[in-house]
Image: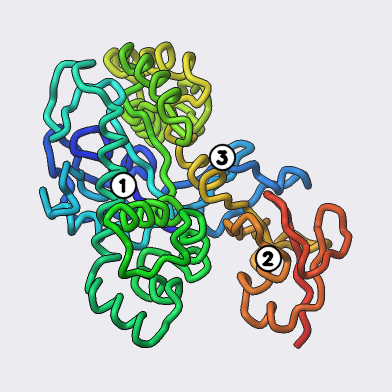
Amino acid sequence: MIIGIVGKPSVGKSTFFKAATLADVDIANYPFTTIKPNHAVGFVKIKDAAKDFGKVANPRMGYVKNDWRFVPVDLMDVAGLVPDAHKGEGMGAQFLNDLNQADALIHVIDVSGSVNEKGESVDPGSYDPAKDIKFLEVELDYWYVDILKRGWDKFVRIIQQEKKDIAKAIFKQMSGLGVTEELAKSALKEINIDTKPLRDWSDEDQLKFAGLLRKKTKPMLIAANKCDHPIGVKNYERLRADFPDYVIVPCSAESELALKEADKHELIDYVPGDLDFKITEKGNSVLNDTQKAALTFVRDNILSKFVEGTGVQSVLNNVVFNILKRKAIHPGGVGKLEDSDGNTLPDCFLMKGDATAIDFAFQLHTDFGKNFIRAIDVRTKLPIGKDHVLKHLDIVEIMAGK
């Protein structure tokens, strides 16, 4: 699973990426600071399931802090997009193609309206961030159209001559974007062009179809960055009303980065997503007056005002669990939660929402799936069938033959 972070230049995209991952990336307030996509590990936050058994998990990947487990996800920061990116403006075609493998997108916008359409600084409130949401939709839809129309005349001719199924042909043309044959078929029906010959498709048909495929294969969440600005709060409320189909999360990436850096240096104790922190100043770590003032500002103007805290953790959790509909499933044993090295619940898998026990068995190992006998719900100690749909935070033991 790869989550792409997108948006125009200078909206705080790289700051958001660094706040989510603590990766070493360039951050600057000018266009095209990022050229090549950056990959790093972010984390979604779930309850530590081992706590239900009076234990603490020892993750093989990720970490546990207090009552929470942080499960890794792959984040990709793509260079800023500008109008007409799909035509190659600002190296846009290259940047869009970097998103091919993304399963979902986080669109970071400057909700304070202090960056214009080119990524240049302007007075706060003088630019309408709603334009950014619309602009990116247009760029992504035309990107899909361009891929759909590659060799269009030849594409149409082959389907006519060989009487190929349209959905199969579209799948072959756009599989690199995550389009499946079933998805193409349902999209054709949804906009009532499933019986319309390709030769009769209008430009409007192509754009509408491409846009629908884009929404289904690259679902998007809006991260309303710089919400700490007074104008940002007003804009956020307006955007929620104007774009009801989007999940829009207010956030302050700069604040989250400051908290994580302070926690990393043992100046404070902070759990990502929490609504407060505790000053610790362990060892030789001591806060200076400037740092104290900055942390006080974050506490008073961000953490105490927004139910999502800085919003960065909320964005990650929302995109994985609400947009992509994933659920966290742990392998474990009824009599023993530890692996051979003594680690408690070392593994956690982010499975699709409709994942069953047999799906989980195959996730663990192909042989487990092929030789599946039954599964056991570790909490209830009851057997479950192979078609049983698993629940978020389930702990499952797989029984397989040889």
The quarter of the picture where residue 252 lies is top left
At x 18%, y 47%, the residue is 34
Look at mark 3 in the image and give the residue it sits on: 65
Q: Position of residue 204 (x, y in %)?
A: 30, 52
Name the spot of residue 172 as percent of width and height, x first: 38, 76
Which image quadrant for residue 350? bottom right
- Tell me how many marks there are: 3
Q: Is residue 373 above or below residue 69?
A: below
Q: Is residue 351 above or below residue 10?
A: below
Disc 1 packing (10 Å; few <14; some 14–19; many ≥20) = some
- The answer to whether residue 283 is seen in the rendering is no
Q: 82 or 224, which lies in front?
A: 82
Q: In 3D space, how far apart are the residues under numbered discs 3 and 2 (Cα atoms)?
A: 20 Å
Q: Label 1, secondary structure: give it.
A: loop
Q: Is residue 162 above or below residue 314?
A: below
Q: Residue at x 32, y 83 (%)?
A: 158
Judging by the rendered image, the residue that carries numbered circle 2 is: 339
In this picture, residue 117 sits left or right of residue 246: left
Q: Amino acid at mark 2?
A: Asp
Between circles 3 and 1, the one closer to the viewer is 1
